[in-house]
Amino acid sequence: MPISTSCLTRACTGAALATLASLALAQQAAAPAQPAAAAPALRTERALSLPLANQIAAATVAACAANGHAVTATVVDRAGTVRAVQRADNAGPHTVAAAERKAFTSASAKAPTLAMMENAQKNPGAANLVNIPGFLLLGGGVPIKAGNEVIGAVGVGGAPGGHLDDQCANAGLEAVKAQLGA
């Protein structure tokens, strides 16, 4: 019902208001229902800074060097993108790719690569993990956590055994533990 501009009586005004109220209610009823607790459109994540990534890489290489191992340490963010790389003097050229792949694998799976390797050896269903492009199931990839949140990973290549690469990675993370809030 159109509202007339010539209607100046109280009855007309009351009827017009009632009509507007009815239209507003009808429009609300036709609108799609909003979920009670809608998830936010954006989320907040903690991320590795470049200085922290460099500290982790340096501490990791130093930990291996203290044990006589020339290694490469690569730090990646939660998406597996390289943030920092440090290659010790005399570390073999293959150690660069190995460290990156271990870090990528660990960040992607949010798990240590040593545990993943052991699981794949014991569980035939997990053996196909080696077929995922970029994955390397050898010890030496360790997630970087801020509290319980995986924010990246460090990968190490070059020590004579994945278990030793793993020890170096953990020692590197221990050196910056206070900065991670862990």
Image (tube, grey):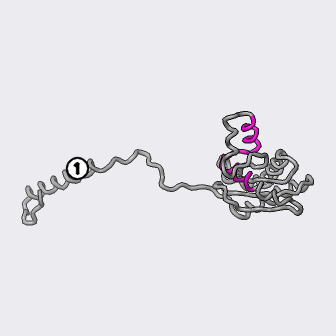
Q: In x, y percent, where is residue 166?
A: 81, 47
Q: Is residue 43 left or right of residue 116?
A: left
Q: In x, y percent, where is residue 135?
A: 70, 49
Place residue 56 in its image quadrant. Answer: bottom right
Q: Which residue is mark 1?
A: 26
Which residue is situated farthest in the bottom direction here? 5
Q: Residue at x 74, y 56 (%)?
A: 100
| Above or below for 160 versus 82 | above
| Above or below for 119 versus 42 | above
Verify whether residue 35 appears in magenta.
Answer: no
**Is residue 56 something that shows in the picture?**
no
At mark 1, the secondary structure is helix
Residue range of the region highlighted in magenta in the rendering? 100-121
Q: In x, y percent, where is residue 7?
A: 7, 62
Q: In x, y percent, where is residue 111?
A: 70, 45
Q: How many neighbours does mark 1 have within 10 angstroms: few (below 14), some (14-19), or many (20 or more)?
A: few
| Above or below for 124 versus 2 | above
Place residue 121 in its image quadrant. Answer: top right
Q: Amino acid at mark 1?
A: Ala
Verify whether residue 106 appears in magenta.
Answer: yes
Q: Residue at x 77, y 52 (%)?
A: 173
Task: Say which of 20 and 141 sits in front.
Answer: 141
Place residue 13 in its image quadrant. Answer: bottom left
Query: Which secondary structure is most common in the magenta stretch?
Result: helix
Q: Residue at x 88, y 49 (%)?
A: 160
Indicate the quadrant containing the N terminus: top left, top right, bottom left or bottom right.
Answer: bottom left
